[in-house]
Amino acid sequence: MPTLQFLQNNWPLVLIVLVSGSMLVWPLLASPLSAMREIGAVQATQLINRKDALILDLREAKEYEAGRVPNAMQIPLSQLAARGQELGRFTARPLITYGDRGNRSRSAAGTLAKLGFKEVYVLRGGLRAWVDAGLPLEKGR
């Protein structure tokens, strides 16, 4: 009985504990269920070399022309839903997405999963992390 009375008298506190606890546990549960995984620049190069991963640049055309990961295909995030069918023949390959800092890639994960990609990776830190790791860039068209 005292426990029930405590819960009734302190329900806001109990609610805060439950919500904050679930916020701590959610990333642990969501990561394995997500179609998207984050990888670093070195892991990305290994995936490219070992599994012929497709690299998808989600930045706009001017950003892409200024410098990109070698052999990257470009479809801006703003056009991904409309142009996604261009990726259809690549669904069996792992896919590494990147933007400038990694934010665009997270937004694209759902669309790419709907297109049939089973292995979607986000380049942690985006192109900036690639450059910071000392990896090469391609420029121009």
Image (cartoon, rainbow, N blue to C red):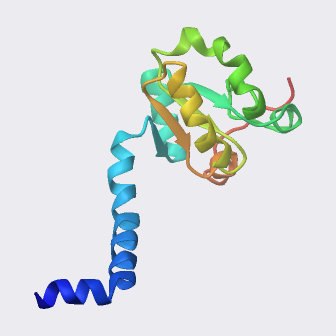
Rendered image quadrant of residue 27: bottom left
- Could you say where residue 24 lies in the image, as x and y percent from the top left? 37, 67
- Whether residue 58 sits left or right of residue 10 in the image: it is right
Residue positioned most to the top: 89
Q: Residue at x 68, y 39 (%)?
A: 136
Quadrant placement of the N terminus: bottom left
- Whether residue 123 sits left or right of residue 136 in the image: it is left
Rendered image quadrant of residue 80: top right
The front one of 32 and 131 is 32
Quadrant placement of the C terminus: top right
- Could you say where residue 128 lies in the image, as x and y percent from the top left? 69, 51
- Whether residue 25 sits left or right of residue 125 in the image: it is left
Vertical position of residue 137 compared to residue 140: above or below: below
- Whether residue 29 sits left or right of residue 85 in the image: it is left
Vertical position of residue 18 compared to residue 108: above or below: below
- Could you say where residue 98 lies in the image, as x and y percent from the top left? 64, 39
Q: Which residue is drawn at 65% across and 54% down?
A: 132
Tag count in the figure? 0
